[in-house]
Image (spheres, rainbow, N blue to C red):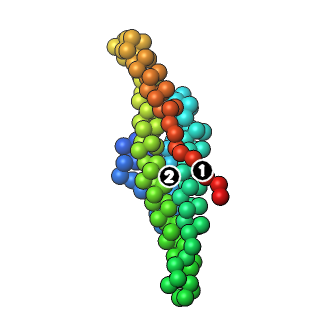
Amino acid sequence: MSYRLAYRRPWELLWGNINKRNVCVAGDAFHPMTPDIGQGGGAALEDGVVLARYVAEALLKEPSEETKEEGEEDKEQHERIEMGLNKYAKERRMRAFELITTSYFAGFVQQSEGKIMSFLREKFLASYLRGLLLKRADFDCGRLNFS
């Protein structure tokens, strides 16, 4: 089976799949963005914390008595990991959408040409964009607890 890599528009993330069975995407594969919003590395670290939290939850959970008796522990653990990846995808989807959309908008504003766009960029969009970038940087993905 082969997969084709393709550019994904920001809004496609809302209904697209980022995980399937026990595989998911994270970091740049999940939320590609331009460097001018300064969030790529931070967002990848956020992904790592959230992903580790859900995978650890799945791995640390004791198998049920039924599966111990039937020898189905691996299958149950696989299902728990899959559920953890689903939780990760659900939690991170909107954050990734915000970052990709901000990057898309910032690129559009900065690369657009013409007198009208230059006027709008210099008089209105620069201050709006600055506030938007600061807002995206203020995010807490929670703690990763160690036991």
Earlier-in-chain disc, 1 versus 2? 2
Can you see residue 107? no
Disc 1 crowd, CA 10 A, few/some/many (<14, 14-19, 20+): some
Where is residue 60? Give x, y as percent: 59, 66
Residue picked out by circle 1: 144
Task: Find residue 61 and report its image quarter.
Answer: bottom right
Give above or below for 129 relative to 145.
Answer: above
Mark count: 2
Residue picked out by circle 2: 5
Can you see residue 95? yes
Residues at marks 1 and 2, CA–CA distance in whole angstroms: 32 Å
| Res 90 label | none
SS of the residue under disc 1: loop
Which amino acid type is marked by label 2? Leu
Residue at (46%, 37%) from the top-left corner? Answer: 99
Residue at (65%, 54%) from the top-left corner? Answer: 146
Which amino acid type is marked by label 1? Leu
Where is residue 63? Give x, y as percent: 55, 76
Give above or below for 34 relative to 55.
Answer: above
